[in-house]
Image: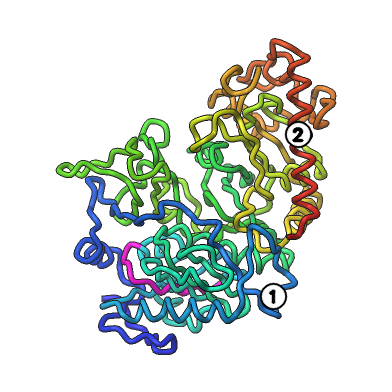
Amino acid sequence: MGERLDVTRYGLTVPEMLRNPAPAILYEHAVRFDGAVITASGALSTRSGEKTGRSPGDKRIVDAPGTRHDVWWGPVNRPVSPEVFRALRRRALDYLASRPRLYVIDGFAGADPRWRQRVRVICSRPYHALFMHNMLIRPTPEELASFGEPDYVIMNAGAFPADAGLSGLGSSTSVTLDLENRELVILGTQYAGEMKKGVFTIMNFLMPGHGVLPMHCSVNEGEADDVTVFFGLSGTGKTTLSADPRRRLIGDDEHCWTDEGIFNIEGGCYAKCIDLSAQHEPEIHGAIRFGTVLENTVQHPESRHVDFSDASITQNTRAAYPIDFIPNARVPSVAGHPSHIILLTCDAFGILPPVSRLTPDQAMYHFVNGYTAKVAGTEMGVKTPEATFSACFGAAFLARHPSRYAALLKEKLERHGARAWLVNTGWSGGVAGVGARMSLPHTRAIIDAIHAGALESDYHEPDSFFGLRSPKRVPGCPSELLRPVRVWSSEAEYERAAKELVAKFEANHARAMFDAG
């Protein structure tokens, strides 16, 4: 069994306590005590209950004297008092103390030992323990023996509701972070991603104070040790385009950029797996094996083969696995300074070019905006394309004001000479429903051309709306696509739509940069 740990300091005395147990033990407990099943590929299939995604409206940060002036208060980070947090903490610990067994996972956030944080997770569901075993950086036996006191503690009592009547809470779900006392308490949601993103929020708070830029991005590395960072919101192709069999994967979601280079915050990947197939995403499909946690997937009751197309529980089906389950992953997940920064957007209005070279100021502008667009069918109630903005491509996880991260990005771009690009994986020739979606082969050709250094010269004049410079030719991509107005049936309609999109950008940029909440 896993090593025992004294947790009486948290007021917890339970019959069975396991510290960093082996995945096989967590499998046994998940099947025996928690309703999990083992799938045909060897992965562990679990359910997260009512909540099948994050609850951003229930995220809170304690308004404490030592940290309040550094937090970006507003709709992303809503305050609660220290007294309310203490009540939530007591409620969580009372629930955990009532369980027959608890799991403690000690691990690291940050692959670079100079910056890593020691994180302790206390939970009652074995699948949550396995999830964080996969997502944190796993300590060696020697590191575990000398782990010491953690820097941050996550108390996951998600199966028990919060007291919705507490001041500052809006529901019985609460994901509340006390940055001063370094604790995260989860009540009322069993969705495992809340733990992962809680750690990311902590890193987003800590790192900028040291001149380190935390980034919601994927990163890969070429044979010449050239590093590329991919920013992008859901649906823009961030995971797909960074999963390149010719390049080493540094990580798929959370990284930091220091004076020495890039490091992955995590020790695993948390991939969407709706419609996953071996043909289109072979690396991820091959990672669905023993040790992987599948969340809210559906499998055949007899064969136990997973039906990745079944969204009857949720569209947000997920797989969490150690990063070394990807064959070309680099472990430890540390790399040099980026050669390229690629900002991915899915423009459903058909205005942005497939690829544009950005100046540092333009990169900062598009980074702060974090633009993409929703199209009909992606969310309930979306009938026509809708512009969506998420500051720094990860507003939900920012602890400080977006301008802080944008200034760090610009400074690092200029100091290290990284080239910045805006790549549109959305539509051309008109809005969604009229124009055509950029094909994946064309987008891959653009990424390949960037990596090959084939887009260093011969550009069109900047467009009159965003001032974007697009190349005149890209190997493997039709030249007419590179100047969006040329593939619209009406130049006047293109200009009207472009002006409307510019107005949306400008209004959002003003809010993101100047509304501190």
How many angstroms separate mark 2 from mark 1 (CA)?
A: 38 Å
Task: Find the magenta span and give its range.
Answer: 117-127
Q: Against 136, is 64 above or below?
A: below
Q: Would you say residue 345 is visible in this rendering?
A: yes
Extreme left residue here?
Answer: 302
Kind of residue sitting beneath label 2? Arg
Q: Is residue 284 left or right of residue 473?
A: left
Q: Against 177, is 241 above or below?
A: above
- Secondary structure predominantly adopted by residues drawn in magenta: strand
Which residue is painted at 77% across and 37% down in the image? 358
Say which element carries label 1: loop
Which residue is painted at 59% across and 23% down in the image? 432
Q: Which of the image's four quarters has the N terminus?
A: bottom left
Contact check, label 2 and label 1, Cβ < 8 Å: no
Query: Nearest the camera: 318 or 431?
Result: 431
Q: Quadrant of residue 450?
A: top right
Kind of residue sitting beneath label 1? Thr
Which mark sits nearer the N-terminus, 2 or 1?
Answer: 1
Provide residue 365's location: percent of width, then percent of height. Answer: 78, 44
Question: What residue does disc 2 label?
Answer: 357
Which residue is painted at 32% across and 67% down in the image? 125
